[in-house]
Amino acid sequence: MRILEYEGKELLRKYGITVPKGFTAKSEEEVKRATEILNKEVVVKAMIPVGGRGKAGLVKIASNPEMAGEMSGQILGRKHGGYVVDTLIVEEAVRIEHEYYISVILDDNLHIPVLIFSPEGGMDIEQVSKDNPELLIKFPVCPDDGFIPYSISDSLINFGINFSLAIELEKIGRKLARIFSKEDLLLAEINPLVLDVSGNLIAADCKLEIDDSALLNHPEYINESDSLLPLEREVKAKGGTLVSLEGGDIGIICNGAGMGMAMTDMLINAGLKPANFLDTGGGTTRKKIKDICQIMFKQNGLKGIIINFWGSIAVLDEIAKGIIDVCEENKPSFPLVVRLFGNNQDRAMDLLDEANIQTARVVCTEEAISILADAIKGRS
Ligand code: GDP
Ligand code: MN
């Protein structure tokens, strides 16, 4: 779970990393008041759990309370990455001399955490790693205690960083690795880590992600900073999981996240773009299927939906009845294809046929997907 930037900064502060002084605010009035209290140039930022705010015009600098209020008017209510901005961060603006990048993440190949540093922070780090991989450096981190058994500063000097700054950067790297390990994180990123005009290193932005499996150790974050999209939250409340994907227009409803991920690949192979997949989870009663399908059906911008269930414990005719219930109230105007396979499948498919819902009586999910692809083609 991504925690919010201000919560992340509190954690950084607790471990001795300098962060700007600031407040959260929900209205122009609150922004003005915060700016008065800080009594300095401030930065006003959208508090949403996605990056790229700078480029989207959701990070603005203001030199006085009036101006800060005006800026907040331009940010509040804007939409970015699926979130509507309803909260802002107002912080002392940092006077930037240089922006560095520093993070600790789990390395997929090494299967341990690594510290990543780049002398070119501030911008999109994925772009840096593509265009200038020589500007990224990695250090293995001990997964047990976050210790880094290497000298980082020696390597930083190779980037032209002077000795005393390299030592300070190394200290921050060690603190970050410690936070990563102690706080059960999957990601701890500071971008930019700012060197200000007075020579101080300040975390101007951070992204921290707690391992969901460790949330029991961190009850303070469980409700407070739920970073789910509104639709994802609705599905969660019904006992399922919705995973939103970017830029697609096909909805997937299935039982099991593995099936959802496999279907995502299969749709792409068939030239379709998944918008999301919705894993109903266990306990698939008629009512639950109805509720969950309803949430998917009301989503905007879909061109097709595929429902695919493997029935072992789940009884498929119950599932079929749930699908029929929701279609009676609100049948999508675009193609919907249902494939149910396993426990009571024939009875289930008969019910769907009787209700005029398109079924795919096929063994392979790929075949069901190509039926959906044809149905969509037939429309356009
Ligand atoms: P992101 O785009 O969502 O990652 O948001 P950031 O908080 O990282 O801000 C984006 C960019 O805005 C940074 O890379 C900085 O260049 C700039 N920025 C953010 N905070 C400050 C600040 O306090 N002072 C100045 N001068 N620029 C800032
Ligand atoms: Mn950033």
Image (spheres, rainbow, N blue to C red):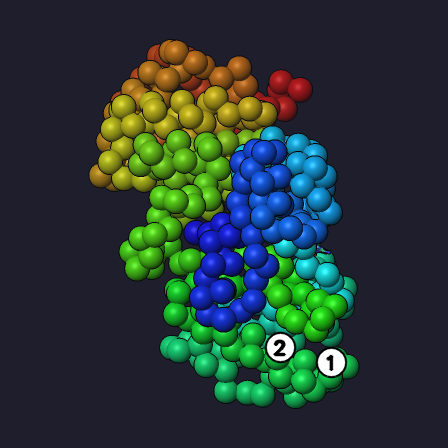
123 vs 204, left or right, is right
Indicate whether 72 appears above or below 39.
above
**Mark 1: amino acid:** Ile
Q: Quadrant of residue 21?
A: bottom right
Residue 158 drawn at (x, y percent): 73, 84
Q: Quadrant of residue 167?
A: bottom right
Rate crowding at label 2 as few (under 14), some (14 to 19) or many (20 or more) other CA atoms within 10 Å.
many
Q: Looking at mark 1, is its residue's CB closer than 8 Å to ligand 1? A: no
**Residue at position x 70%, y 51% in the image:** 41
**Mark 2: amino acid:** Leu
Front residue (pair 254, 100) = 100
* Mark 2 residue element: helix
Residue 149 drawn at (x, y percent): 50, 87
**Residue at position x 42%, y 71% in the image:** 181
The residue singled out by tag 1 in the image is 161
Indicate whether 26 appears above or below 19.
above
- Disc 2/disc 1 C-alpha distance (Å): 10 Å
* Mark 1 residue element: loop
Rate crowding at label 1 as few (under 14), some (14 to 19) or many (20 or more) other CA atoms within 10 Å.
some
* Circles 2, 1 touching at the beta carbon (< 8 Å): yes
> In terms of image quarters, where does ligand 1 lie?
bottom right
Residue 99 visible in the picture: yes
**Residue at position x 70%, y 37% in the image:** 66
Locate the C terminus by quadrant.
Answer: top right
Front residue (pair 122, 300) = 122
Front residue (pair 87, 27) = 27
Residue 69 drawn at (x, y percent): 66, 36
The residue singled out by tag 2 in the image is 169
